[in-house]
Amino acid sequence: MTSAATVAAVAEGRLKSAPSSLLDASAISLSGLCLAHCLALPLVAAFSPVVATWAEAEWVHALAIGLAAPMSALALWRRGQSAAVILLALTGLSLMALGVAHWPSHEAETPITVAGSLLLAGAHIANWRRRHSCAGKAG
């Protein structure tokens, strides 16, 4: 099932999603890996030519977006979701995609991607907090 088909299935309620806490934790971890890739890997690559090839591998960026988009949709897409959380996630994913596309320039890739990753992680943290504060009020 493609990412778009997965999102559509979740929106229509045809697909049972994994527990939201696990998805949020996974998405936050993926954002952390993205940050490590963007910030730490270039420093390590300066000392190792083998690692330098991984620092510039475009497939890694495409894979990160390919995992982040459906994972975020599964964790965040539901009735009654905060508009602020959705806007934060969409802004983060959009910035990550712009960074992967090297827009507006190759030099801006890292700061744009890091900003997007932080916004997306922030959306998942806000979602996790909101869900747990609602669960505390119910119990």
Image (tube, helix red, strand yellow):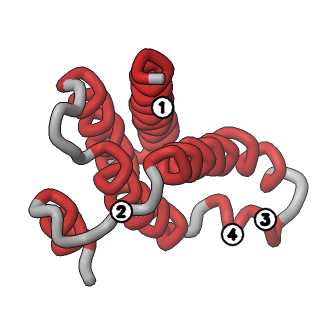
- Residue type beneath disc 4: Thr
Q: Quadrant of the N terminus?
A: bottom left
Nearer to us in this view, 116 or 83: 83
Single out the mark in the foreground, 2 or 3: 2
Task: Give SS at disc 1.
Answer: helix
Mark 3: secondary structure: helix
Confirm or deny contact between disc 1 and disc 3 (CB under 8 A): no
Gap between marks 4 and 1 measured at Cα: 36 Å
Residue for badge 1: 128
Q: Earlier in the sequence, mark 1 or mark 2?
A: 2
Given contact means CB atoms under 8 Å apart, are the residues at marks 4 and 1 in contact?
no
Where residue 91 sits: x, y (%)?
A: 27, 33
Report whether residue 115 is seen: no
State which quadrant residue 5 falls in: bottom left
Q: Nearer the viewer, mark 4 or mark 1?
A: 1
Q: Which mark is residue 51?
A: 3
Residue at image mark 4 = 53
Residue found at the very far right of the displayed protein: 47
CA–CA distance between discs 1 and 3?
34 Å
Res. 84 image quadrant: top left
Q: CA distance from mark 4 to mark 2?
A: 36 Å
Instruction: Say the numbered circle drawn on residue 17.
Output: 2
Alpha-carbon distance for marks 3 and 4? Answer: 5 Å
Looking at the rendered structure, the secondary structure element under dot 2 is: loop
